[in-house]
Amino acid sequence: MIRLDASASDFAGAFTTLVNARREADEDVARNVTHIIKRVRDEGDAALKDLTRLFDKHDLDQTGWRIDRADCLAAWEGLTPELRDALELAAERIAAYHLKQVPEDSEMIDAQGIRLGARWGAVDAAGVYVPGGRAAYPSSVLMNAIPAKAAGVRRLVMVTPTPNGEINPLVLAAAHIAGVDEIWRVGGAQAVAALAYGTQQIEPVDVVTGPGNAWVAEAKRQLYGVVGIDMVAGPSEIVVVADGKNDPEWIAADLLSQAEHDPTSQSILFTDDASFADAVAAAIDRQIEQLATAATAHASWDANGAIILVPSLTEAIPLVDRLAPEHLELACDEAEALFEQVRHAGSVFLGRLTPEAIGDYVAGPNHVLPTGRRARFASGLSVLDFMKRTSFLALDSAGLAAIGPAAVALAKAEGLPAHAQSVAIRLNHREE
C-alpha cells in the first residue's frame, strides 16, 4: 500500500506515477483474441463448442447450448423469500431510475419555416455479457438487462460462461425478473464474437454490453464497429474522500469492497487527518483477514492501494479529477460542496451513510461505469446505450429558397459540384 503526503517535496512525481500506473493484466491478449474472433466468424458453432470445451471444461452438446426460460423461472421460485424480495427491490429501483432516462422525440419549425427534429428508437437486439468465472453477479444481469428493456429492445440475449457446465441459480433468477429472452452457455471473447457476427444457432445483435475479464474487454474493443459496445472496462476502482469524523472501520470496509473484486482493483483514500489515516490502515489490516476473499483483497490492497494525506479535503478534488475514478465517495460534512467541484467521476456517493456498495445493488443508478480514467470522457451505462437517434428534415419551397443558395455556395467552395447541383436544380425549377 502506498502512503503519500501532498505536502512532501516529491509528491507531484509520486502522484503522477500513481495516476499513470497501468493495472490491466500484463499478458498481451490481443493476438489470442484476434485468433478467437476469426475462428468464431469463420467456423461459427464449431468454434464455440471447441473453445467452451477448452476454457469451461464441458461439452455444449451434452450440457445444452441454451438455458430455457423455464429454468430461469424455476430458479426464481427456488429462491428464499429474502433473496426474492431483494432482487425485486433492486429491479424496481433500477427500472424506475432508467425509465426516466428515455429521451423524448423532438420537432420544431424554425424562422424559415423549415421542419426539423429527431426521433429516438431502440436497437433491434442487444447482447448482455455476464461473468461466470471468479464470481457470479446477478446484479450485473439487472444493471444491463433492465436499461435495455426500458429502452424498448425487442430481443435481449444473455451470454455467460458456465465452468464445468454449472451456473449460479441467482443469475438465472435475475434473468427471469429482468425479462431476458435468450441465454447461451458461452463466455469469453468467443461469446462476444458470436453476438457480433452470429453463428448457426445464435443470431447477431446490434449492441453488446456488460463486464468481463481482459479477454472480453479486448474482444469488445476489436469488434466495435461490427457491433456497438458500452465501453472497454478495466479493473474496478474506488476513491474515498473522508475526514476524521468518520468511523475508520466504515471507511476500511468501503476500500475493501473494491479490493476484493480482483487483484488488479484499486482503492484510494484521501484524508486531511493523519491519525485517521493510520486508523483506517489498521482497520484494513484487521478486516482483511476476516474476509473469505482475503487473498484477492490482499493482492489488490498491497499492490494498488493508497492513502494520501492532503492539507484540506478541498485540495483533494483536483487530484481526484486527475484520477477520474469509477466510484467516488465523499464521506464528510461538506460532501455537497465538494461534489459541486468534481468534474470527472463515474458515480459519486454523497455523505457518510452512502457506501459505494449500495450502488452496486439496489440504489438505482447503473453500476456499469467507466474505469481507467475514462470518466474524463465517458459515462456509465444508460438507456441511451441501447438507443439511437435519427434526425429528420423537411423543406418547402420557401425554406429551400431561404437556405439553398448558401448550401450551393459552400458545396462549390468545397469542390463538390454534384452537391451544388443537387440543391441548385431545385432552386432553378422553383424559379421557372
Image (cartoon, rainbow, N blue to C red):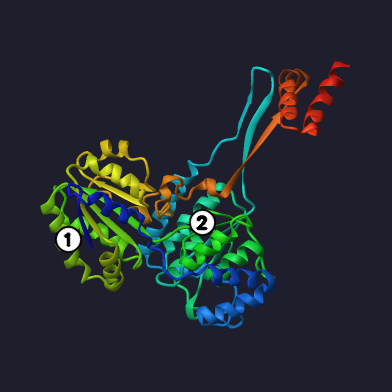
Asked if residue 58 lies left or right of residue 396, the reply is left
Asked if residue 371 lies left or right of residue 300, the reply is right
Q: Position of residue 7 (x, y in %)?
A: 17, 47
**Secondary structure category for the residue under label 2:** helix
Is residue 151 placed above or below 59 in the rendered structure?
above
Asked if residue 430 lies left or right of residue 54, the reply is right
Q: Residue at x 26, y 36 (%)?
A: 337
Is residue 226 placed above or below 392 in the rendered structure?
below
Quadrant placement of the C terminus: top right
Q: Which corner quadrant of the image does residue 420 belong to?
A: top right
Q: Which residue is at the front of the view, 73 or 354? A: 354
Q: Is residue 82 visible?
A: yes
In the image as oriented, which residue stretches furthest toward the left? 275
Quadrant placement of the N terminus: bottom left
**Secondary structure category for the residue under label 1:** helix
Q: Earlier in the sequence, mark 1 or mark 2?
A: 2
**Badge 2 is on which residue?**
145
Is residue 382 placed above or below 249 in the rendered structure?
above
Q: Residue at x 26, y 61 (%)?
A: 305
Q: Nearer the viewer, mark 1 or mark 2?
A: 1
Is residue 43 placed above or below 361 in the rendered structure?
below
What amino acid is labelled 2 in the image?
Answer: Ala
Q: Position of residue 104 (x, y in %)?
A: 56, 36
Q: Which corner quadrant of the image does residue 254 belong to?
A: bottom left
Q: Which residue is at the front of the view, 301 or 382? A: 301
**Badge 1 is on which residue?**
281
Q: Residue at x 29, y 70 (%)?
A: 299
Q: Residue at x 74, y 21 (%)?
A: 405
